[in-house]
Image (spheres, rainbow, N blue to C red):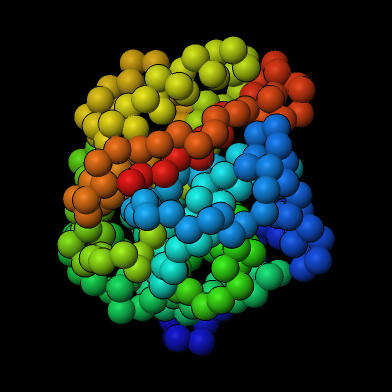
Amino acid sequence: MNFEQTRSPAVAGMFYPSDKDELSESIHQAFLDSKVGPGKLPPMPRSEEHIYGIVTPHAGITYSGAVAANGFYEVSPSNYEDIVMIGPNHYGIGSKVAIMKNGTWDTPLGTVAINSELAGLIEKNSTLIKDDEFAHSRDHCLEVQIPFFLFIWKRDFRIVPIIMISQDMQTSVDVGRSIAKVVSGPDTLLVASSDFTHYESNEEAHRKDIKLVDSILTLDVANFYSILERERISACGYGAIATVMTAAKLRGATHGRLLRYATSGDVTGDKDAVVGYSSIIFT
């Protein structure tokens, strides 16, 4: 792959509008949503609190955009230069843990470059991480986050995209440690892209997911996996969450804070078979 390679949007027109103005308006409305969103537009007033990472959902913007907006609102006053983004590989194509080291990602709101140097250092620190652009070609989990960052900052920043087929605890801790070894200082944000319970009743999704959220807030990865398995929680990006928990804790985070939990049923009113969404920050 050469440095000029551009990853074109895979889900524009499906997960979010492909038209620039329509997409911007959709994100604008997600922030103004007072039911499950922050109810206000960024930037948030500056805080002394340092945010090491966030957990954010990746469903269609109609369903999870307002929940996601809570986390983006919190990081909106910060001056991060790089975003290390980790999510699940929904299609099972390519490497077990795939990083994309070179090129740019295109969106209707603009193009974002990969920090090749940082990506290379992360890859070098782990035998599990492989440079694999093909693994990223179809997946939506990281793509849907970028327009939010372009909306809140309207400035240059770089990304390091990683998606995982293998999401067991050993792999997630290894990847998290690999990231923490080379990410220092306040200039890099960690992002875990994941939805929570899939296609259960609204009541059951709330019951299960809040248990999992509680384990995330304590940064206890072993307990997180224990609850995930005991409750049979179908969170798709659990390995991404554990990776960011690991890296954030090693970088100095002491706890997580839940900004908002809601399901697709809470948003649409159809509560028979919902998907859970959570917005969490690590400080």
Q: What is the x, y in percent for residue 135?
A: 46, 60
- The residue drawn where x is 74% and y is 62% is 24
Looking at the image, residue 186 sits to the left or right of residue 22; the answer is left
Does residue 91 appear in this view?
no
Seen from the viewer's position, the closer of residues 43 and 274 is 43
Seen from the viewer's position, the closer of residues 40 and 116 is 40
- The residue drawn where x is 30% and y is 43% is 245
91 up-or-down from 63: above or below: below
Q: What is the x, y in percent for residue 278?
A: 52, 35
Looking at the image, residue 12 sits to the left or right of residue 51; the answer is right
Does residue 105 appear in this view?
yes
Looking at the image, residue 253 sits to the left or right of residue 137; the answer is left
Seen from the viewer's position, the closer of residues 70 and 227 is 70
How many badges with numbers are in the image? 0
Quadrant in which the N terminus appears: bottom left
3 up-or-down from 164: above or below: below
Q: What is the x, y in percent for residue 97?
A: 34, 55
37 up-or-down from 77: above or below: above
Q: Quadrant of residue 118?
A: bottom left
- The residue drawn where x is 59% and y is 12% is 203
Q: What is the x, y in percent for residue 136?
A: 49, 61
- The residue drawn where x is 54% and y is 18% is 206
Q: Quadrant of residue 261?
A: top right
